[in-house]
Amino acid sequence: MKRASSWIRQARATTPGRFRLWSLVLTALLVALSVLGALVASNVSGATGRIRENTGPALVATQLVTASLAEADAAATAAFLSGAQEDPEQRRLYEQALARAFQYTEEVSARIGADPGAHRSLQELSVLMSRYAGLVEAGRASNRAGVAGAATYLLEAVDLLATEVTTKASTLIAASEARLERDEATRAGGVALARAAGIAVLLLLLVAQVSLLRRTRRIINPGLALATVLLLVAVAWTATVMSRSEARFERGRRDGYESIALTAQVASTAYKARADETVALIGNDRSRQARADSAASLLIAGPVTPAMVASVRAGDDPAGTGLFDQVVRGADTARERAAAAELLVRWQRYRDTVASLRSAASPEQARTLAVGPASSTFNGFNFTLESVLGDNRTQFLDALDGSAGALRGLTAITLALPLLAALGVLFGYQTRINEYR
Amino acid sequence: MTHPGGSPRQLWTRRRFLATSAGAAGALLLPACFSNRDPAAPDALRVLNWPDYIDADGDDGSPGTVQRFTDATNVPVTYTEEYEGNEQAFADVFEPTLGSGQPTEFDLVVPTYWAVARLLDRGWLEPIPIERVPNHVNVDPAFLGMPWDRGARFHMPWQIGITGIAYNPALTGGPINAVADLLQPALRGRVGMVAEMRETLGLLMLTQGADPSRATEAAADAALDRLETLRRDGQVARFTGNEFVDALKTGEFAACLAWSGDIVQLQAERPDIRFVIPVEGGIRWFDSMIIPKGAANAEAAADWMNFVYEPANAARITAAVQYISPVLGVREELARAGGEAAALANNPILFPDDATRRRLYFWAGLDSDAEDRLQERFSAITG
């Protein structure tokens, strides 16, 4: 220590010594910056990759579990309504939707990593889903056998889904969202520090260059100039790449994930309206009709008119606050607006059939309408909704791909360029020092 | 059957063509290609469809769909009627181009649904620009739920058919209501089946309690075993395309598996011939419009889809080809048109009710290796 401090004192006494000191300090700073930059870049890339590979898909899959279960429920009740001669189409839809819901839970499980709390919630959700499926099967078997009380099983299943399953799924969604927030925070961690350090070292290099210029009244020192340019490139390139990655990430969040969350909310609300309507018919319970209307009004206040559809296609923002209005406002391309317009048209067709079955002359006629046109129109709405969810999912995952792709090579660049700059500094000062020998 | 132009004409349906061409694999492509303008026009829409699967211009000069599309949109159309069958289309059209990343010569093609699923699986389709197809809302919901394309974002159905049973009551001695009825000894050697694997196997699977819409290899093999026995025992006289029409007319077949559209046409001439959807259920199939990857004029293809999904336009096509339309509102349009068209609106084969629809099954795709193996075995049995 003493020797080092004595060496520094001696070095400060002469011009070449001071140059040596400057070169060593700058080199040390550049090496430190290189290590810091690489660590931060690796952290950002790692967090982005984790979001792309795990957190993002898990979050999407969690939303889709809910949507698939709600779809299964709507199909199960419709199949039940068709009586002993079960509607195979609705049964198929039920089985497919339930299978998808289980597949999504498996996907979530595979992607949430070592999170005991989330795994426990998922396990509990799976148990509830199995219980739900069991009740549906019991109702189906009794229905086909013409056993009295078959509806009780189905009504219990519907309530189980509407309460416990939905609550558990919401817990999982909240946990997935929290994981996304955490990964996003990790992604941003250290970036500001590395950026500030880079700018500070850049300024020091400029000071060193100016100082050399003043002292020697000569041309620019090529080594220092090279180091400055390299560091400038590293800082600018990193800033550009980070900002591009961030922009893509945000776009994915806005156009992808937030749209998924909104569409999933539309799906759940619509399925709830459908299930309530069907249960009202099964249990001859008018209060469930009121619940169905209440759910429907969350989607859109009043009927969908052709003028409204034309306006959506034209890109006008609706004034309403319903979920459909929010979907339309979030549609920022002609394709998305067309999909939103189709959703509106198909929803209204379903609501029209609901109005017909409510005014049916007899319960039998109402059941026929429920199993026929109401099922068909609702399926039309549902499949359109699924394609919108699919588009959102693709947008989200593509944007995450883009965000991760934009960071490709970042670690190598942030490591290599400052090191090369350090070599430039050493070379630049050494050439000046040599002039004193 | 009468074309929109009013001139009666014997249709050579896409199914008839399929059957004929199946026996002449590798035959020359049909030269049936017509265009309403310069076919080489760079902005022309290039459509590839099955032969006689659309309303043509009438003898009295009334325009068919192709001409009316051009009149409405100012887009010239090169309409080619050379789609010879799905396997052949893969071999001649899709594989050599799309398989090596090149576009085909067409902007719009009309394969059968299982071939569409295969094309989509290989990434050979463009998404439909639905922003140009507001009439996408008229797609019958039954066709939005295909597991391989939820919401029909890559295809729009063109026409639908049902494979059921046609019979001559005078020759069967009574009604035939089930596929099992075709297998009674009294009909030995006077029964026909269709040479389309997915349909014949699907119907036999239904008799064995298996669901073709959830087909498994084991269930399909069991159906093939049954078919082999029927063939060996001489219960089935032969397997046909829609030559079953002539066989029914001449009395060679007392009963057979048959395609709905052909029987609707035959009934105009022979009202005594019956068509039923078997009690076990019927097989539903459809051909669908797709835009191949890299198509130069995808926007015009979308405009075409939008045009033919206008119920009034779709109704004219239905009146001509007499297959089931996938377009909502066609029935009302036919009823409004009056005359023969209105009679079609009440035809239960063209417009099956909900109870009937519930008894119709699509063949669920197996993986392509399995389907190839089944096809090979089926061909060996049917000869």
Image (cartoon, rainbow, N blue to C red):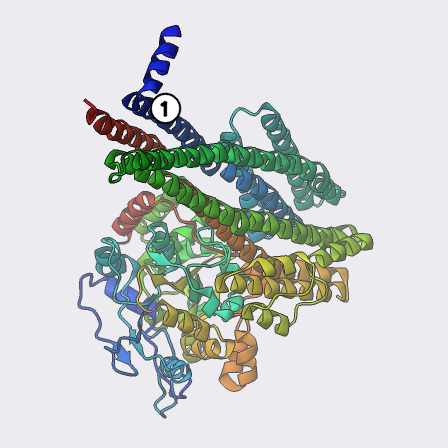
Q: Could you say which quadrant of the image residue B46 lies in?
A: bottom left
Front-lying residue, B310 or A325:
A325
Identify the residue shown where x is 35% and y is 60%: B192
Report if residue B310 is visible in the image: yes
The disc numbered 1 marks a residue on which chain?
A
Residue A221, horizontal then vertical, whole percent: 26, 36
Instruction: Answer left or right for B268 relative to B373.
Output: right
Which amino acid type corresponds to the residue marked 1 in the rendered image? Val
Report if residue A107 is visible in the image: no
Number of marks in the rendered image: 1
Instruction: Answer left or right for A134 relative to B318.
Output: right
Residue A57, horizontal then vertical, whole percent: 50, 39
Front-lying residue, B314 or A229:
A229
Front-lying residue, B278 or A171:
A171
Q: Could you say which quadrant of the image residue B124 lies in?
A: bottom left
For disc 1, the neighbor class at 10 Å (few under 14, some 14 to 19, many from 20) is few
Residue B131, horizontal then vertical, whole percent: 48, 67
Front-lying residue, B236 or B107:
B107
Is residue A193 shown above or below A383? Answer: above
Residue A51, horizontal then vertical, whole percent: 48, 36
Q: Tell me the quadrant of the picture where the N terminus of chain B can be found.
A: bottom left
Is residue B72 shown above or below B84? Answer: below
- Name the secondary structure under disc 1: helix
For this orientation, the residue located farthest to the bottom is: B60
Instruction: Answer left or right for A313 relative to A242.
Output: right
Identify the residue position indicated by label 1 in the image.
A25
Q: Tell me the quadrant of the picture where the C terminus of chain B can be found.
A: bottom left
For this orientation, the residue located farthest to the top is: A2
